[in-house]
Amino acid sequence: MAIEIKFLGAARSVTGSCHLVRVGEHTLLLDCGQIQGSHLDEELNRVPLPVGRVDAVVLSHAHIDHSGRLPLLRKQGFHGPIYTHRASRDLCDIMLRDAAYLHEKDAEWQNKKRHRKGLASVTPLYTRDDAQAVLGQFAPLEYGVRQRILPGVEVRLRNAGHILGAAIVELWLEDAGRTVKLVFSGDLGYAGALLLDPPTPIDEADVLLMESTYGDRDHRPFDATLRELESIIRGATDAGGNILIPAFAVGRTQDLLYLLAEHYDAWKLERWQIYLDSPMAIETTELYWRYRDLQRNGLFREGRSPRLANVIASQTTEDSMRINETRSGAIVIAGSGMCNGGRILQHLKHNLWRPECHVVLVGFQAQGTLGRRLVDGAEHVRLWHETIKVMAQIHTVGGLSAHADRTGLLGWYGAFKKRPPVCLVHGEPTAQQALAAGLKEKFGAEVRIPARGESAVL
């Protein structure tokens, strides 16, 4: 029997990470992520995964585009173990429940419209009960410990530096008397990250699955990012508007809180009310405090900072709605990070048409999302069947990315001694082609960019 990899998601795209590995008679999945983007893209999540029997899952990290279809996999009949770092397990407890709640609310909203038209009801993609059930299958691991998880399969997780608990996956696959080492990068962090250590260098692999999100560009220098953030805050102070920051609840929000604490005096933040408007981000921030042993510096090692006394945690829907009564002096950090759902949409509805307001996009914006349309200069957007004119100032602040940039990706690959062949995943085609050219030119690497559904035999 051959060792085979089949690419089922995040192939020539950045969402829906999912790769099937067959070793002899056994099958495992690397990630089982939700497809995100346009409505048509997200409808693909309802198509059953073409995986047959799965014996185990190894999850690189908790982001929904890597973990979000695990409840669906269980509904397809999978009841095996899900191996991941212990912090990722705890983050999935938060994130899968939140995703399920959003699916339930979306189905409820659609059904109100469908019933008025005499159409049949739709069901949620999955429910909170589904999410809770799959959490019972998680098997927590630690960084650096090698262990057998299936006959002929050993795994070791190494720190990826992307978010809390994120892992590079090392797999030793035995078949017909030979062993092949497969390394899956997961999502690699940025070497200059505020809270987490840089990705662990790996020096041996026979084949590499490597992310390529920013394979075509470097992040701007961090000093420039700080100057831009200060300039935005000063400009908004003078104009008398609000600042909206769509932010991922995991990682990006905690980076922002750290920066606001570090620069509280210099940026004159005592003039502002800072709203953390995301129950998931609030819960996740508590988890960052609990796992501060996995972080290298800052706010979450030292505990709560008294200098963030003007941060208001908005737990309830009513709390969130009251923010929109504030015409100026509010910094609102809310999900989702790509503006494709969550509470940020209400704040955009109330502020996007106001020229004195600012929208600060601090993370990757996938094709098909509202955030991407704002980055690309949309003059009008649709929110709840209402056309909103974009008059607010839109800022793209790239220095806070949780992903390695082009230089970081090339540098991480450079640690491998024998220059293993690479399959590039988790990237849009332009980024992947640019990174492939760089890997070939600098290292002479053999590079493949698989499409969804393609296979590679080792």
Image (cartoon, rainbow, N blue to C red):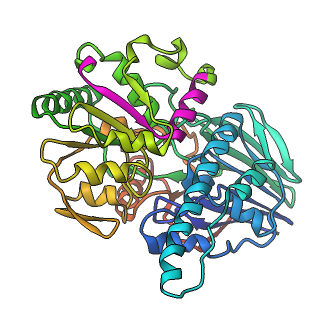
Furthest residue in direction bottom, as rendered: 118
Give the image quarter of residue 428: bottom left
Question: In the image, is residue 260 above or below residue 107?
Answer: above
- Which residue is at the front of the view, 15 or 259? 259
Asked whether, in this view, residue 90 is left or right of residue 420, the answer is right
Question: In the image, is residue 170 above or below residue 194?
Answer: below
The residue lying at 34 percent from left, 29 percent from top is: 274
The residue lying at 73 percent from left, 58 percent from top is: 130
Whole-percent x and y of residue 95? 60, 46
The count of marks equals 0
Q: Is residue 42 visible?
A: yes
Whole-percent x and y of residue 61? 61, 44
Question: In the image, is residue 347 above or below residue 104?
Answer: above
Furthest residue in direction right, as rendered: 151
Give the image quarter of residue 368: bottom left
Whole-percent x and y of residue 269? 27, 20
- Which residue is at the front of the view, 199 or 134? 134
The residue lying at 53 percent from left, 51 percent from top is: 210
Give the image quarter of residue 366: bottom left
Give the residues in magenta. Answer: 270-289
The residue lying at 59 percent from left, 55 percent from top is: 101
Q: Is residue 208 visible?
A: no
Query: Is-magenta flag for residue 206?
Result: no
Q: Give the position of the N terminus as an image quadrant.
A: bottom right
Asked whether, in this view, residue 287 is left or right of residue 414, the answer is right
- Magenta stretch, main secondary structure, is helix
Whole-percent x and y of residue 228? 20, 32
Asked whether, in this view, residue 248 is left or right of residue 295, the answer is left
Q: Give the position of the C terminus as an image quadrant.
A: bottom right
- Which residue is at the front of the view, 62 or 328? 328
Query: Is-magenta flag for residue 271?
Result: yes
